[in-house]
Amino acid sequence: MVILKGANVQLRPASLKDAEARLALGTDVDIAEMFGVSRTDAKPMTIDAAHKWAQAQTENGHAWIIETDGRLIGEIKLHSFHVQDRRASMAVAIYDPAQLGKGFGTEAIRLLIQYAFTELKLHRIGIRVLAYNARAIRAYEKCGFVVEGRERETAFVNGVWHDDLMMGLLATEYRT
């Protein structure tokens, strides 16, 4: 698996050693809420959960650790590949609240989509995002993703139903 380097972040393959860094980042309830977890349901990160997370990352041939200054701050991956249609879905997470709002997620997305369109020859990348996750939506839009639809009341978070937005980017729309 390749290492993707940007100006401020590096995307590298995961290793089992990443469990320790993931455990240290813990569970931030504000971040968990952006993934659709109710604040009261957010669980502290455990050693076992961190090891399972690291194992899952190493088993996905299209998952990368997002690093800045040599420190793990998140993950990004492609999943749900459809080979004939040359499409996949993307997921990204910044787990360190101190690193939010600095453009690291946007840079990681740009690195991944460049690799996906130029090296993997994908035609389309899709992503689902909760409609209230404005920070993520802005990052996706900066990278060229457009809203393609809305799935109503898909997530029950903090006692309220919330919509998912479906966003997509085509290779023909991609610009470096």
Image (tube, helix red, strand yellow):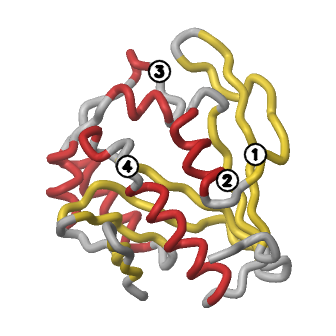
As drawn, the label of residue 38 is 3
Above or below: residue 132 compared with residue 52: above
Above or below: residue 63 compared with residue 154: below
Q: What's the CA distance linking mark 1 and mark 4?
A: 20 Å
Q: Pinpoint residue 74: horizontal percent, then vertical percent.
A: 34, 55
Which of the marked residues, 4 or 3, is nearer the chain's N terminus? 3
The residue identified by callout 4 is 94
Above or below: residue 126 compared with residue 35: below
The residue identified by callout 2 is 127
The quarter of the image holding the C terminus is: bottom right
- Kindly indicate whether the residue at mark 1 contacts the one at mark 2 (C-beta within 8 angstroms): yes
The residue identified by callout 1 is 166
Q: Classify residue 106 as left or right of residue 31.
A: right
Residue 21 falls in which quadrant of the image? bottom left
What's the residue at 24%, 41% (across, down)? 98
Which of the marked residues, 2 or 1, is nearer the chain's N terminus? 2
Q: What's the CA distance linking mark 2 and mark 3?
A: 21 Å
Q: Pinpoint residue 34: horizontal percent, then vertical percent.
A: 49, 33
